[in-house]
Image: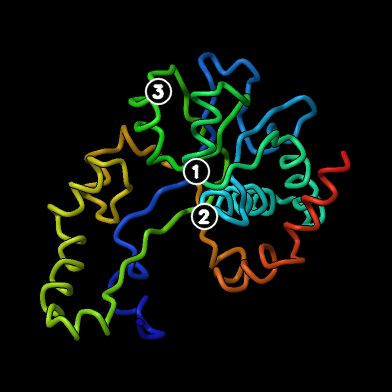
C-alpha cells in the first residue's frame, strides 16, 4: 500500500516522535531494581507482554539484549541475560494493556517494562505510587507515519494527508506530542519539556539489530531465538 522508500519521504526516518522502554516499579522500589540485569536475578517477578504478539514485548526483549551489548557484554552473555529475564515472567499477556492490568490491577510482579509514554497514563488510571527506572541503556521506539498512497489517491485526499503529516513536525504538532508524553524530535520543544523526558542512552533497532525485518527473522519468527529462549526458560 506504500512505497519501499516511505521512510525517506519525511524527516527523522518518518518518525515525528519517539519513546523509550523503561522499568516501572512499585513505591520505594523494594527490590532495588536499577538496570536490566536486575530483572534476571533469582526471585524477581517481571511483567512483560508476549514478544510474539506485542510490539511492546519485542521492544522489551531487544532493549535488554541490546543494552547488554552496549555495556560490553558478549553476545552469548546478552542472550543468557534475556533468558534469565523471561524465566522470571510469571505470565505472558498478549499485549501492553494486558500486562499493565496484570501489574497495576492484579498486583502481580515486582516490575513492569513499558514505554515511557505509558507511565503517566498508568499512574493516572490506577492511582498507584510508581517510579520509572531508566536503565543505563535502552531502546529508542520510533513512531513512524506514512500516507497510504492508494487510499489517499483514490479518495482525493492526498494533499490533506501530506499536509497533516508535515504538521506533526511543526512547533505546534511537537508541543501536542510532548503534552501527550511522546518525545518530540524538535530540540527546542524537547528542552522545554526536559523534566518530563530525562536524558537517556538509547540505541535504535537499526543500529544494533540491523533493522526490524532482520530482528523479526532472527528473533521472533517461529523457531527463532526467542522461541529457543522461552523453551529453555520454561525448564528453569
Query: In which quarter of the view is residue 158 placed?
Result: bottom left
Which residue in the structure is indicated by mark 1?
Answer: 96
Question: On the rendered image, what quadrant is the C terminus found in?
Answer: top right
Who comes first in sequence, dot 3 or dot 1?
A: 1
Residue 70 image offset from top left, x and y in percent: 64, 52
Residue at 49% in and 23% down? 105
Which residue in the structure is indicated by mark 2?
Answer: 55
CA distance separating discs 3 and 1: 15 Å
Question: On the rendered image, what quadrant is the N terminus found in?
Answer: bottom left
Q: Is residue 176 above or below residue 6?
A: above
Which label number is shown at residue 126? 3
Do tag 1 and tag 2 residues touch (Cβ < 8 Å)?
Answer: yes
Query: In which quarter of the view is residue 6 placed?
Result: bottom left
* Secondary element type, mark 3: helix
In this image, 214 relative to 190: left or right? right
* Secondary element type, mark 2: helix
Amino acid at each position: 500500500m506504500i512505497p519501499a522508500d516511505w521512510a525517506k519521504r519525511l524527516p527523522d526516518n518518518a518518525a515525528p516522535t519517539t519513546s523509550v522502554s523503561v522499568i516501572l516499579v512499585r513505591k520505594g522500589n523494594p527490590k532495588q531494581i536499577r538496570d536490566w540485569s536486575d530483572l534476571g536475578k533469582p526471585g524477581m517477578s517481571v511483567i512483560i507482554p508476549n514478544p510474539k504478539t506485542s510490539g511492546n514485548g519485542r521492544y522489551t526483549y531487544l532493549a535488554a539484549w541490546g543494552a547488554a551489548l552496549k555495556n560490553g557484554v558478549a553476545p552469548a552473555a546478552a542472550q543468557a541475560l534475556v533468558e534469565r529475564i523471561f524465566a522470571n515472567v510469571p505470565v505472558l499477556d498478549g499485549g501492553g494493556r494486558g500486562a499493565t492490568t496484570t501489574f497495576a490491577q492484579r498486583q502481580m510482579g515486582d516490575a513492569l517494562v513499558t514505554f515511557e509514554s505509558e507511565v503517566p497514563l498508568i499512574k493516572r488510571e490506577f492511582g498507584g505510587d510508581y517510579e520509572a527506572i531508566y536503565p543505563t541503556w535502552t531502546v529508542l521506539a520510533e513512531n513512524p507515519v506514512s500516507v497510504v498512497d492508494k487510499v489517499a489517491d483514490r479518495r482525493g485526499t492526498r494533499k490533506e494527508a501530506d499536509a497533516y503529516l508535515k504538521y506533526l513536525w511543526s512547533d505546534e504538532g511537537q508541543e501536542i506530542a510532548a503534552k501527550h508524553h511522546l518525545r518530540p524530535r524538535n530540540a527546542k520543544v524537547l528542552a522545554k519539556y526536559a523534566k518530563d523526558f530525562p536524558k537517556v542512552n538509547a540505541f535504535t533497532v537499526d543500529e544494533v539489530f540491523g533493522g526490524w525485518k532482520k530482528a523479526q527473522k532472527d528473533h521472533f519468527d517461529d523457531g527463532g531465538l526467542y522461541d529457543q529462549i522461552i523453551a529453555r526458560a520454561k525448564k528453569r
